[in-house]
Amino acid sequence: MSDKDRRAKESEYSYELGKLVQKFLPTEKERLIYKTMQKTFGLHPMSNVDPLMYKRGGFHQKRRKEEFFEWGRKIAKERGIPAYNRAVGIPLGQRALEPYIISGTDVIVDYDDLHHVNNAAIQQMLDDIKRTVIINLDTTHKVLQVRAGKEITPETINLYLETVQHTIAGGAVAQEHMAEIHPGLTSDAYCKIITGNDDVADMIDRRFVIDIDKAGFHPTKAELLKHDIGDTIYLVVRAPTIAIRMADGGVTYRWAAMQSSMAFISAYRLTGESVISDIAYAAKSAQVIQIGERTWYSRARSQNEPGGIPFGYYADIQQCDNTLPAEPYYKIIADNLKEGRRFMSGMGQAGAILATMTSLIWYGFYMSGGLGFSTGVAAGAYCGNVTDDLMDNFSEIQHASMSRVATVPPKWPRIKFITDMMIQAAMETYEKYPSLMEYHWGGAHRISLVGALAGSAAAMLTGSPMVGQMCLNYAIGMLMKEGWVRTGWAGQEVQDHLGLAYSCAFRMEEGGLIEFRGCNSPYTSYTAGHGAGSIAACLSASIGRGRAYVCNPVVKVAFADRDLKFDFREPRLAIAKAALRQFMPAGERDLIVPSH
C-alpha cells in the first residue's frame, strides 16, 4: 500500500453531530439539557440559527438592566457626575440575554443577580467562612487548672458559654468604662461547642452545642465524625459579620481571642497578669484551627481569606454530601444506578460553593478586581441543569462499566478508558446543542465544568484525589485541548504549570498532598478552571472511600451548624433566594444610619 493510500482522509474527521443527532431526537428530548435550553432560549435547542438576533430589544430584554439604567440616571442627576450609562460601550442585547435557571429548582433569575456584589447570599457565604475560627478548650482548661487552680465542671463550662455569647457580640464584663457594641449590629455573633463524646455534650446547655446526631448527617457518618473528634471540647467562634467587613478574615482569631479571654476572666474570676496572658495565648494561638492561612507575599492576604484556605477545608466546609451513607461509591454505582446518581448529585451540588469561592471570589474578585466574566464561569456549575444532566450521563457510563468489577485500582490505565468515554460524551453534548454553546459562551465555562466533573468521577471511582487530579489535567490539557484546539481562559498553558499531580512528597516544590494545597500554592499557576476541580477531586475521593469528611472532622461539623446565616447544605437555593431578594444577610448598618 502506498503512502498516499495510508493517509487518513479529511472526510473521516469531518462529521456534523447536529445532523446525526436528529436520528435520536426522541431520546434527546428526554434529556434535562434539552428541556432547560428550550425553556431558556424559547427556541429549538439544537438550532444553529437565532431568528430573533438583533430583534430582541437590546438591554430592555432584562428587568434588571432597565433598573440599572434608571438608577444610573438618578445617581448622575443627584451627584452631578455620570454613573452607570448604557450610552457608552457596546450595545447590549443584540443576542439573547438569557435567563438563568438555578439547577435543581424552577427558579429563574437574571444573570446580573448572580454577580457577587449583587447577591447577598454569595457575600454571606464568604462572610460565614471568614468569620469562623475554632478554639481547643481542653488546652485552656488545663491552663485554668494548673496555673490558676480552678476546677472545671459542667456548671463552670455553661457559665463560660453564656458569658462568651455576651462578649463575642461586643459586650463588656471586666471593666466599667468600656464602650460596647449595639447588639443589633452583631446579632449574628455566637459560640458553640463541638465534641464527639455524647456524655460531655449532654452536660452542656443544648443551646450551645452543635449536636452531630441532629446536624443532618447520615447516621453512619455521624458515628465516624464522633469517633474521630473524640472527647476533646472545641469552641466554634462566629465573629460578627460587620467586624470582618470592616477589617478582613485576619481579625477573626484576634476577635475570638480577646472576647473569649474576657469571658474566661469573668466566668472564672481570674486575676494576675501572668495567668491572664497564658489564657490569652491558649485562646489565640495554642491549637487554634483557622480556616485559612496567610497567603504568600505577591498575593498578600491575612488569615481566613479565601486564597489561603486549603482544598481539603473547602471540601469540608460544603455540606451537600451529609445525607449520603458512608459507603464506597464503586460498590453503590455497580449495584444501584439510582443511588449512584444520588451520590453524584451530592457532589455536583457542592459546585455552587466550590466554583463560587474559587472562580468568582478568589480569581474573579480578589485577583482580578471584580471582572464580570467570572460570574458566568462560576454560574456554570450551578445553573442551567448542565451539571446534573452530565452527571446523570456519567453515572450511566460508570454503571455499565462497573458491571462485575470488584474494585477500581487507582491506576492510570484502568481509569483512562472510562475518563475518555465520559469526556467524549460531555464534548459531544456541547457539539449537539448550539444553545448550550451559547449558554456557556466561553471556553472557560466548558473547560472548567467538564474537567472538574471528569476529575470528580474518577476520584469517586478510585477513592484517590491524585487520580482525580490526573484526570482533571488529562481532560483539560489533552482531550479537550486536542478536540477543541483551544481551551480559553480556564485551560491555557496549564498542562505546563500545574505542578506534579502525582507527587505525595511534602517538599512543596514537589507537590504536597492535594488536600493541603490551595489556590495560594506558589509553585503552580492555577486558573479559574482548576481551583474548583481540585477541591472536587478531594471531596469526591472522600465520598468514594465512604468517609465522613475530607480533611478535618471539626471543620466539617462546624459548618453543619443550622444557625449559620448561609445554608451550606443547600447552596443553590440560598443563592436563588438572594437573586429574588429574599435572603437577609448579616452585618447591615441600618440601626446607625438615617432612615432610607
Image: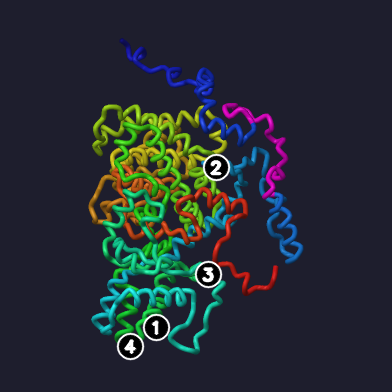
Q: Secondary structure at mark 4?
A: helix
The reply to whether dot 3 and dot 1 touch (C-beta < 8 Å) is: no
**What's the residue at 43%, 38% (across, down)?**
450
Give the image location of residue 4, x and y in percent: 36, 14
Task: Give the residue type that dot 1 points to.
Answer: Ser
Judge whether 78 appears above or below 322 on screen.
below
The reply to whether dot 4 and dot 3 touch (C-beta < 8 Å) is: no
Q: CA distance from mark 3 to mark 1?
A: 21 Å
Residue farthest to the top, as pictured: 1
Residue identified by numbered label 1: 266
Task: Give the residue type that dot 2 points to.
Answer: Thr
Give the image location of residue 67, x and y in percent: 70, 53
The disc label shown at residue 273, or none: 4
Residue identified by numbered label 3: 187
Q: Which residues are magenta?
A: 43-65
543 drawn magenta: no
Q: Is residue 248 visible?
A: yes
Q: CA distance from mark 2 to mark 4?
A: 57 Å
Q: CA distance from mark 3 to mark 2?
A: 31 Å
Q: Give whichever of discs 2 and 1 has the lower sequence position.
A: 2
Q: Is residue 303 visible?
A: no
Residue identified by numbered label 2: 105
